[in-house]
Amino acid sequence: MSQADCGTPPIAPTPIHARLALLAGDWSGTTTVWFEPGVVGDVSPVVGSIRSVLGGRFVVWDYAGSLGGKALAGVLTLGWHVDRRRYEASWIDSFHNGSAIMSCVGAADDSAISVLGHYGPEGGEWGWRTSLEFADTADTLIIRAWNIAPGEPEALALESRLQRS
């Protein structure tokens, strides 16, 4: 079945959709995790693939790595909402989201793609801000995430430095 068969008209590509398309590829590198500010909790390899889906409307980052020697995996779906003029994302993983789907949103920014979501129990939710940006070239991607404890400033929690395969 094609997109035309399901009644969904194609969207006109935007410069932001073109920016998302640049992320597509196979990636590998190292993830550093901090459980408290300034104290490295783990450094481990990570591999994954970012693919463009649904005619370029979204990209999906599907990855696998480890934490403390235990395997983990996750999926980030990221897109640009044309009408609301914002990034929207969903994040699932086998580490801290458990059975939850974290929804995230973020404004357009020229330097990085950045979205903010929340996790944890109602009334005590933590923030989780994720950014994706190219380093020196389009073959070096840095994904960072910050934990935001209730009433506290954000603290770097994760940094994946990836090279395009």
Image (cartoon, helix red, strand yellow):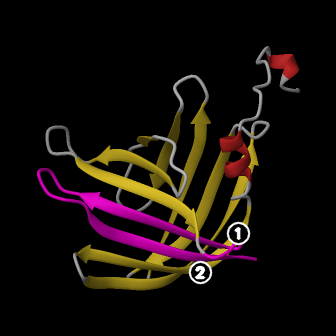
Quarter of the image for residue 161 reads bottom right
Horizontally, residue 99 falls left or right of residue 51, namely left
State the residue at coordinates (76%, 34%). Answer: 13
Q: Which residues are magenta?
A: 136-165
State the residue at coordinates (49%, 43%). Answer: 90
Q: Earlier in the sequence, mark 2 or mark 1?
A: 2
On the image, the x and y values in percent for residue 72 come to 48, 69
On the image, the x and y values in percent for residue 3 come to 83, 25
Q: Secondary structure at mark 1?
A: loop
How many labels sit on residues? 2
Q: Circle 1 is placed at which residue position?
A: 138
Q: Residue furthest front?
A: 110
Quadrant occupied by the C terminus: bottom right
Q: Secondary structure at mark 2?
A: strand
Q: Circle 2 is placed at which residue position?
A: 29
Q: Residues within 10 Å of mark 2 (few under 14, many from 20)?
A: some
Horizontally, residue 5 falls left or right of residue 141, namely right
Q: Main secondary structure of the magenta part?
A: strand
State the residue at coordinates (51%, 38%). Answer: 88
Name the kind of residue labelled 1 in the image: Ala
Q: Residue furthest left?
A: 151
Name the kind of residue labelled 2 in the image: Gly
On the image, the x and y values in percent for residue 1 come to 88, 26
Decide whether residue 30 is among the magenta residues.
Answer: no
Q: How far apart are the alpha carbons under marks 2 and 1?
A: 15 Å
